[in-house]
Amino acid sequence: MTALEVMDKYKCDFCVHGDDIVTTPSGEDTYHKVKAAGRFRTVPRTVGVSTTQLVGRMLLLSKDHHSPYYDDRTARNSVPTGNLIQMTEGASKLSPYTGVGQYLPTSRRIVQFSEGREPKPTDKIVYIDGTFDLFHPGHVAILKQAKELGDYLIVGILPDDVVNQKKGFGWPVMNLHERVLSVLSCRYVDEVIIGAPWAISEELIKVQRINIVARGTVSDPAYKVTSKEYDDAFETPRRLGILKDITSPIRLTTSDIVQRIIDNRLKFVERNIKKEAKEIQQLNKSQELIKPESIKSPEKPQDSKPPENPQESKPAEKPQESKPAEKPHETKPHESSPEKPPIERKVDESKTQEKPPPC
């Protein structure tokens, strides 16, 4: 529950959230106090990316959301066409908000997140690479220090398969395209390389006009690489004299966050179930406005049931109009007009059916 006291403490004017349903597991509006104070703002939600989905991936440790990769020279940034993740533990597919899926990138979305600024000829360009999974304060801190080394910061984001090979099953939690948007949203980042190579080559340095290669001092313990393998990845910038080690101010890692979720697995599963139930309840309430219209339609056939038998209803009207004309019995033998006999026969039949009731 967002408190106004916390916002005032950190001098926040507004609280911003996506346009999806925001309720606690008990069904209470998470931001009702902020909204009442007029300090709440809504922004369009990025479709396919949510914290609930990421929690589901961490709980199941699936890698179906990864993008394919072959090697550093043929890195492919395509989206997997099959085996799109289908996770149901902790949430079913009944709610469009609580669930686990995969973000499908578009060029418009990437442009929306990117800075759109090109480096000037005089800019000192800094390069730093990594996984940047579950973008957290440790990532922000190291990117801020890297940007202070120059004027233009390029971030290389490793492909899914490389991370999976170096860290093991289930990694990364966020796929390549999701991690790209996370890094692009950081104010210190000017540009990203989508699917950067594990080893920094001289070709990469020349093409990107890199002046400094930054490297942090904190490495995620989940990486299963030797110190030699890690050092070899930076052999070229070290040889060129442009490698710069920077001390990571925050020692938080992605593995720490995942471990917290796993340790509280049952709580998160129960949370998702309750949260989805409340979302479905709110969705049903919004659809109640349509129900009265759907109820009126079945009433119409009930009103129209009597005229369903035209043979019974039509003759009931005709005798009322033809009651004064009871002479058809006398005109039968005459048969003066060829058109009257069929009409007279119909009238006679109806009369024979009506005569019993008055008796």
Image (cartoon, grey):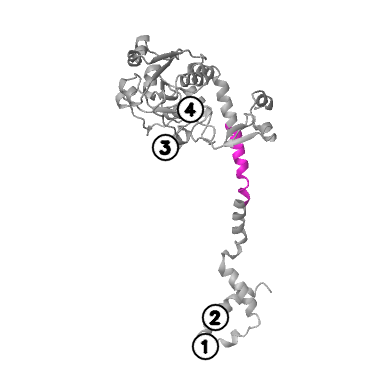
**CB atoms of marks 1 and 3 within 8 Å:** no
In-front residue for pair 155/30: 155
Around disc 4, counting alpha carbons within 10 Å, would you say few (fewer than 14), some (14 to 19), or many (20 or more)?
some
Around disc 1, counting alpha carbons within 10 Å, would you say few (fewer than 14), some (14 to 19), or many (20 or more)?
few
For numbered disc 4, what is the local secondary structure? helix
Dot 2 or dot 1: first in sequence order is 1
The three-letter amino acid code for the residue at tag 4 is Ser
Dot 4 or dot 1: first in sequence order is 4
The three-letter amino acid code for the residue at tag 2 is Ile
Q: CA distance from mark 4 to mark 2?
A: 84 Å
Identify the disc placed on residue 337: 1
Q: Residue furthest front?
A: 122
Q: Which residue is mark 3?
A: 107
The three-letter amino acid code for the residue at tag 3 is Ser
Q: CA distance from mark 2 to mark 1?
A: 11 Å
Q: Which residue is mark 2?
A: 343
